[in-house]
Image: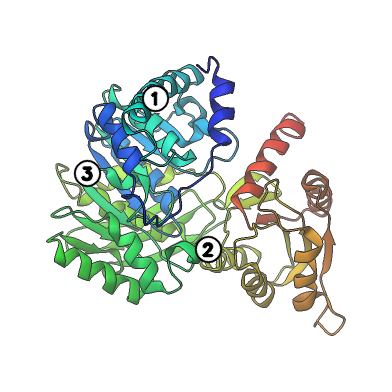
Amino acid sequence: MIMTYDEAVEYIINVPRFNKYIDQNHVANATLIALMEELENPQLKVKTIHIAGTNGKGSTVQLIKNILVGSGYRVGCFVSPHLIKINERISLWSSLKENSEDTYIKDYEFLEAFRKVMVAYDEVKVKAGDRLPSLKLFEYVFSIAAVYFENKNIDYCIYETGLGGRLDATNILQPELTVITSIGLDHMKLLGDTIEQIAAEKAGIIKPGVPIVFNTGEEQADLVISNRARKLNSPEINVAKGKYIINDFTPSAIDFSCSNSYYIYQHINISSAGLYQVDNARTAIEACNNLPGIKAPISEDIIKAACDSFCWQGRMEKLCDNVILDGAHNLDAIIPFTKSVKALCRDKGVNILFAVADDKNYEDMIKYLSDNLKLKNVYVTSIESDRRVLSEQVADIFRGFVGGELCKPKPCNIFSDNDLKKVFDMAYNRAVEAGETLFCVGSLYLIGSIKEHYQRKYKND
């Protein structure tokens, strides 16, 4: 039996990340279902909200959590991936004044829940023999979260899907409300290569009679979700039908107003430089106002406090005065990231540090950045993962778009090195010396590594 927290984490992170998304030989989540039954279904003992989407899931989780906590509820959150420590995936909130680090599951609690899961899993394997596939990383962490939340006197748990929705581990939940955020082309080898196919996978979280709030940004996806909701007699709320305006925008906050037929919220300030967070905030507001058991409309004061307290690491996150981090890792996330950068930098040249995973369509990401930003300096590195793409390979793509002598008015400078820490140090120090901003983008792996390195080397400077 694993005896320490570190041993437990080491064991989990060395487990394969996912089962084959479609396995003809097994019922989806069969092993997880058997495990949960052995544990007496802890995931069904707390009211849950279930969230899927290509981008915006994590931010929407945090905003819904803020609104509910501000309304007096005790809320658990399950998100992925983690940036530095696996405990970040599981948190428990009772106040908006809590620091994020203080809400994460403690090491001893993680170990305690892990041991309970392993005892039950051993029993499942004895009963099933070789008939069931092995648990994967995401299923382990989901199980630990369900066990942890079971006896914490929680009013609501918010669960974010890991991949897709229909076959995701979290889809064994029986939620009070389902939410689908923006939908784009990502994980196409597993989810399909059209918006409609991907939307159908996300719509797999909709349950009969359970309200579905959605804000996909795609008419084709809206139609798929709406058709699915009607088949299941699930009340549908399309956030896009509401109205909103952006009143003001600064590097630290966005002032917006939004309304529909039964509420008007004026001058809501969301603490973010990401314009896309307005859509996530509107989705969270609709979700909470349509959550069964909640007296709606929620007061404007609660909405304002929730948005003002918003913080989600790696999404237009201000690491320090000269660095902003964004985990945009597909084209559909790069587009709103680029809009935010243009709004912040206006006519100034832009400095970016970029790295990407090999399963992303990174040439399209690079082309969009190059076509739509006035790039001044591009620093290319590699993520610390077996999914890394070598920096020089990526730098060559940038050179094809912005590095040639024919580029007007002036080609940007492109630097590349596979040593992530070395590249960040160079880019950061140059940005500080010039009094400029460095935007780090392309991968959540990149963001996690930068945060960890910055905290160790610069935080106490």
Locate residue 173 relative to residue 375 in the image: left or right: left
* Residue receiving disc 3: 174
Q: Position of residue 186 (x, y in %)?
A: 50, 64
Locate residue 354 relative to residue 130 in the image: left or right: right
* Residue receiving disc 2: 333
Which quadrant of the figure has residue 234? bottom left
Residue at the farthest bottom position: 406
Which quadrant of the figure has residue 117? top left
Q: Does the residue at mark 2 contact the one at mark 3 (Cβ under 8 Å)?
A: no
Q: Is residue 181 above or below residue 62?
A: below
Q: Is residue 393 visible?
A: yes
> What amino acid is found at the position of numbered circle 2 in the picture?
Ala
Res 122 label: 1
Q: Is residue 73 above or below residue 132?
A: above
Decide: few, some or many residues near mark 3? Use Cα within 10 Å; few <14, some 14-19, many ≥20: many
Q: Is residue 73 visible?
A: no
